[in-house]
Image (cartoon, grey):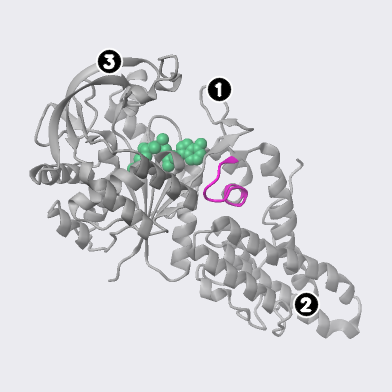
Amino acid sequence: MSKRFYITTAIDYVNGQPHLGHAYEKIIADVIARARRSLGQEVFFLTGLDEHGQKVQQAAIAEGKTPQAYCDELAADWTSFAKSLGLTNDDFVRTTDQRHKEFVQAILTRLNDAGHFYKATYTGFYSAKEETFLTQKDRRPDGTFDPIYGEVVELKEDNYYFRLGAQQQWLIDYIGANPDFIAPSYRRNEILGFLKNNTLEDLCISRPISRLNWGIPIPFDPNFVTYVWFDALVNYISIAAAHGDKAVLAATKSEIGNRKSEIELWPADIHVIGKDIVKFHAVYWPIMLKAMGLALPKQILAHGFWQKDGARISKSTGNVVEPVAIINEWGVDAFRFYVLRELDIGPDGNWTEAGFKSRYQAELANGLGNLVNRSLSMLKRYRNGIVPARSNELAADAAKAADETRALLKQSQLQAALQSIWGLVNRANQYVDQTAPFKLAKDPSQSQRLDEVLYNLAETCRVLAVLLWPFLPGTATKIYAQLGLAGSPDKLPAATWGGLQAGQVIGEPAPLFPRKDI
Ligand code: ME8
């Protein structure tokens, strides 16, 4: 078996319920995963939960639960959330999984044996809220620390450190030589700027159990647990190892558990993450991988942050978007469409209810929904639902949309692909208005012309179903069913014009996006 296209998301902290930002990231990864499958690649899509660390421990204590019980309860909500989003993930990692914990410990042992770690005493200012030590550079001009750090206390403690000193230059060279390694390019420039203008400090990879005990024990020192980021990043390879990935198993010389499969995954093709955690993925993670003797991921794809109504999303101020409530009211495809169409992968976005409703009405109900419904209803009414002979009037428009969509999907340009697809939706709606089939139907001498128009419309709907499948899988499947076609529109080569055969009997037209009073 050949190497799979391996795509991952950040694993989310289980210190509350999932929000819009979490949903957005997982949907991006799902669309890319579906698109690659549709293009004929074998794919492995991994998402999951980051369950250790102070944030989770504190949230559990606040609810009077043990961290494990707290995580178990929330993990059920998050896995059902993944289902509500329509995700096609192949595995779901929890960092409390035994398969992950054992692997992290094996890695720690090996890196320690190879001399990558040392123990040292550090005195400094510590923010429990952000789980980070602060330096003089973090002080504001008046000497205080930013309130985002919460209470800052002076701490003196022993810890284990990962040597990063010798690693800076090769990473700068690597990023320089691999322009697609960090995308979009402005994030790459930020990381290059950071690496060129700062000296990397060694990374503290442990936490004393006196301060934090909710973590993976450091195998060579029972007084410490693993720093949550060192634990979390490793999920991308611990799960590859759990599926029998040869590269990871060989590099880490690990033999854990009974592996049934031998799926080739590493290196990952894309790590989809948010802009706030690029440094962890583009600086620390590559250095960790190099120390383990593993190849670097091919791309770190960083998306922006959502706000709502121009303000930060925040549980405490109540400024939230409830993805599940939106999905229940409007359907998962409407939710997926809005976030992908509204926000390109990179910049920040702003959710407004008016914006959501306006895209629903204009692009889904009046655009795509209306096109499919009137095309198929007319075919039903005027031709008993039987597809007429092939005609190629819209073939060039459909081919243009299909070619563009294919190329854009390969570059993970999801918003641009949707724009291209809607170019075809709009062209076909315009074609209905220009050819006026309802008028042609009244004139028996125009019967052949009506056949042509109806074929072009029905075939355009079929092509649209194939192009839309990665984005709006439920809608695409409904369009196929309404066309009376068996199977799923899940193979991009099927977007070639002429797939609909004369004589095909279509199914029942039904509105895809019911119009709502808004
Ligand atoms: O950072 N808009 O977890 P997390 C868009 N456990 N994306 C957002 C967002 C927003 N408003 N808020 C958060 C963590 N995100 C770590 C990751 S990976 C080895 C460990 C994104 O729950 C954020 O950028 O705080 C990140 O990619 C993901 O949601 C999880 O954030």
CA–CA distance in space, label 2 to label 1: 54 Å
- Residue hosting label 1: 317
Residues in magenta?
A: 338-349
* SS assignment at label 2: helix
- Residue hosting label 3: 154
- Relative to 142, does residue 417 appear above or below in the rendering? below
CA–CA distance in space, label 1 to label 3: 30 Å
**Of circles 1 and 3, which is in front?**
3
Question: Between residues 38 and 161, which one lies in front from this camera angle?
Answer: 161
Q: Is residue 205 left or right of residue 482?
A: left
Q: Which mark is residue 235?
A: none
Query: Is the residue marked 2 within 8 Å of ligand 1, measured from its CB?
Result: no
CA–CA distance in space, label 3 to label 2: 76 Å
Residue 240, located in which quarter of the rendered image?
Answer: bottom left
The x and y percentages for residue 176 are 37, 56
The first of marks 1 and 3 along the sequence is 3
The first of marks 2 and 1 along the sequence is 1
- Residue hosting label 2: 453
Q: Are marks 2 and 1 in contact (CB under 8 Å)?
A: no
Q: Are marks 1 and 3 in contact (CB under 8 Å)?
A: no
Q: Residue furthest front?
A: 197
Whether residue 96 is visible here, answered yes or no, is: no
Query: Looking at numbered disc 3 in the image, what kind of residue is underneath it?
Result: Glu
**Of circles 3 and 2, which is in front?**
3
Query: Looking at numbered disc 2 in the image, what kind of residue is underneath it?
Result: Val
